[in-house]
Amino acid sequence: MIDYNDRGRLKWAGFSLSDHTEKIDADVEQRANQNLAKEQMTTEEITEVLNVAVLKRKVVCIQKEERDSEGYYPDDIIGKIKGHDELGIFVGDYKLHYDEIRHAEIQELDKWSQL
């Protein structure tokens, strides 16, 4: 028989190190995707932005007044305004009540020639 010196747990250290590195990378990526608060707008400012978006058929970017358990805001709702009623507006596939809107802005899309 060949004398083989088994390193025991040492040979598995590389696997646990790579698993740990993957977990750290996932945590860093998750923290990078946290949305911070945008400026709180008044009702008049929000109305003005939404009116311009409807008249000029522009894409709007809306931050809802909602937070998760860690105090971060959900992803912005982006799309064209498809309609409205007395309670809110329809943006893409979402219905937003007027009192849920924290910040609204017209999203300037880059032209393909500027990329």
Image (cartoon, grey):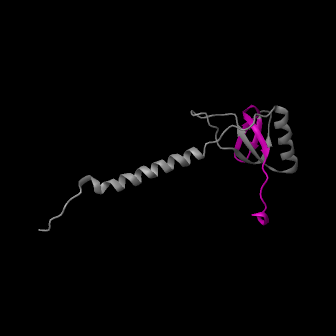
Question: Which quadrant holds residue 45?
Answer: top right
Q: Quadrant of the C terminus?
A: bottom right
- Identify which residue, 104 or 35, lies in the foreground: 35
Q: Position of residue 29 (x, y in %)?
A: 55, 49
Q: Per the image, is 96 magenta?
A: yes
In which image quadrant can residue 47 be found? top right
Q: Is residue 111 above or below residue 87?
A: below
Whole-percent x and y of residue 104? 77, 41
Quick one: 51 or 42, which is closer to the camera?
42
Residue interval drawn in magenta: 88-115
- The x and y percentages for residue 100 are 72, 33
111 relative to 78, above or below:
below
Residue under the image location 75 percent in, 36 percent down: 39
Give the residue at x 28% y 54%.
Answer: 10
User: Residue at 53% of width from left, 47% of height from top?
Assistant: 28
**Of all residues shown, which one is farthest toward the bottom?**
1
In the picture provided, is 12 more to the left or to the right than 87?
A: left
The answer to whether residue 53 is left or right of residue 73 is right
Which of the 4 image quarters holds residue 66?
A: top right
Look at the picture and state if 80 lies above or below 11. above
Look at the image and tell me in which quarter the N terminus lies: bottom left
Question: What is the tally of numbered marks visible in this picture?
Answer: 0
Task: State yes or no: residue 30 in magenta.
Answer: no
Viewer-nearest residue: 49 or 115: 115
Residue appearing at x 24%, y 57% in the figure:
7
Q: Position of residue 40 (x, y in %)?
A: 76, 34
